[in-house]
Image (spheres, rainbow, N blue to C red):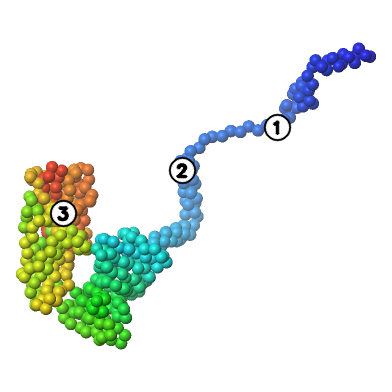
Amino acid sequence: MLDSKNSAISAQTLVPTQTPLETKRPPDPAAHQKMPHVEVYWTAVTYKTVIIYAVLALAIIFSILYIASPNWFSSTFHKISTAMENSDSEAVAINQTQAKFVNLDGKVLVKKVDSVQWVEADFHTTLDKGDLVQTGAEGVARITFGDGTFYVVKSDTLITVEENSMASNKPTSVAVRINTGSVDLATPNWTSPDSKATVSVEDSTAQLHSNSRAAVKADPDKKETEIVMARGSADVQRGTERIELTQFQKATVPVGGPITKSDVLAPPELAEPLNLAPIVGENPKAMSIHFEWKPVQDAVSYTLRISATSMFTKTVKTATVNGTSAEITGLDPGDYFWNVSAMDQKKRSSEVSDTFKFTLVAQGKTQEMILDIDSTQLHGRVAEIIGRTEPGAALIVNGQPVPNIAPDGNFRHFTEPLTPGEHTIVVIGQNRRGGTAKKQVSIVVPK
């Protein structure tokens, strides 16, 4: 017995102990056959394939719906299309009814009605009721409202947007208040006779009628407000006082005194150079450019101003002459704007005339340049000019640069809206070698 026990102990020490799970047993074929098992297979599918199948599925569903119930399908499709169109129309309408800047020169600041900070104005800035606009000593801003009314905020001016009502199918109403400074405004031909554009100063208001233009100035030194009509008519009111102004009339509204009305000089009508006319010369700076305008009754002198900017924040030439023409030299090649004002014997000045633009182009030493006008088409009052030139060349059509010229030199250009009548379209080109070319085409815009 002892020997048997020792043998067991000895065997136990020689063979490693095993847990019941580790005990090796012969495989049971029957158990293996009864054990459940799962086999997994997969196939890689790209996003493109998924999208194609999804589109095909939707097409099948829509086809079944259309075959089963064509009336329901058409009605549902129409509702979805209308909802999308209305959404786009509302977004466009909101954008079109907001007041925004279309010209900015110098320092122009804006303070939104819900903000305490002043920020620099840019062309993405929109204006709402209660917003403030302030221009610096050399700042000028041109603001357009949704109804087509323009307000030009002169330098050193602070205004408040008081109203911008643009409800559809209703009369429009826009208004600004001059806190200090001066504003020019012009109204379009409104579709509704009840539409109005107003500018107010202190306790007085000037309401312009359709197709009118006026200049309003608050003079703190004289303690009075001046409203001068350059076109159309307006109603000026302060309390129970009310007068009507017509073209070339001025209303003076003094503090503590009655409103007075008087006639003013008419602004001159410009003649030469024509608006958007190009002027070509070998040496533009030495050229003598002829400016001419029509005479104004009772005027004894005229002031000609030439600027490189449309807002005339900085003038490059100023000339006071007794006649109705002037010769100007010393201008570099580029775009220029010019206008004229008249003055009578009492040193009273008229409003400035309309502003014309001209382009001064340096003519190259060689005239060898390709410039052909293939055809012209009239789209309403807009002319389309189709032609070809040299690759890399620059073109100007009636004073406006052509922004899109194909790499092969082909170009299409749409002019600004033209007035009814005959027009001469002038195309000027300049290539990289310094050569220039000029072409002219005549277009008649029907009435």
Residue at figure coordinates x 25%, y 79% from the top left: 224
Residue beneath label 3, please? 334
How far is disc 2 from disc 3 in space, using C-alphas?
A: 56 Å
The quadrant in which residue 204 appears is: bottom left
Q: Give the residue type at disc 1.
A: Pro
Label count reads 3
Q: Secondary structure at mark 2?
A: helix
| Residue 348 x/y as whole percent | 14, 76
**Which one is nearer the viewer's eye here, 379 or 136?**
136
Question: In this picture, is 46 found above or below 312?
Answer: above
**Which one is nearer the viewer's eye here, 146 or 122?**
122
How far is disc 1 from disc 3 in space, using C-alphas?
A: 89 Å
| Residue 437 x/y as whole percent | 10, 48
Residue 256 horizontal side relative to residue 321, left or right: right
The quadrant in which residue 79 appears is: bottom left
Q: Secondary structure at mark 1?
A: loop
The first of marks 1 and 2 along the sequence is: 1
| C-beta proximity under 8 Å, tags 1 and 2 | no
Q: Residues within 10 Å of mark 2 (few under 14, many from 20)?
A: few
Q: Give the residue type at disc 3.
A: Gly
| Residue 137 x/y as whole percent | 25, 65
Q: Quadrant of the C terminus?
A: bottom left
Residue at figure coordinates x 28%, y 61% from the top left: 107
How far is disc 1 from disc 2 in space, using C-alphas?
A: 38 Å
Residue 65 horizontal side relative to residue 232, left or right: right
Residue at figure coordinates x 50%, y 50% from the top left: 61
Q: Which disc, if any, is residue 36?
A: 1
Residue 78 visible from this viewpoint: no
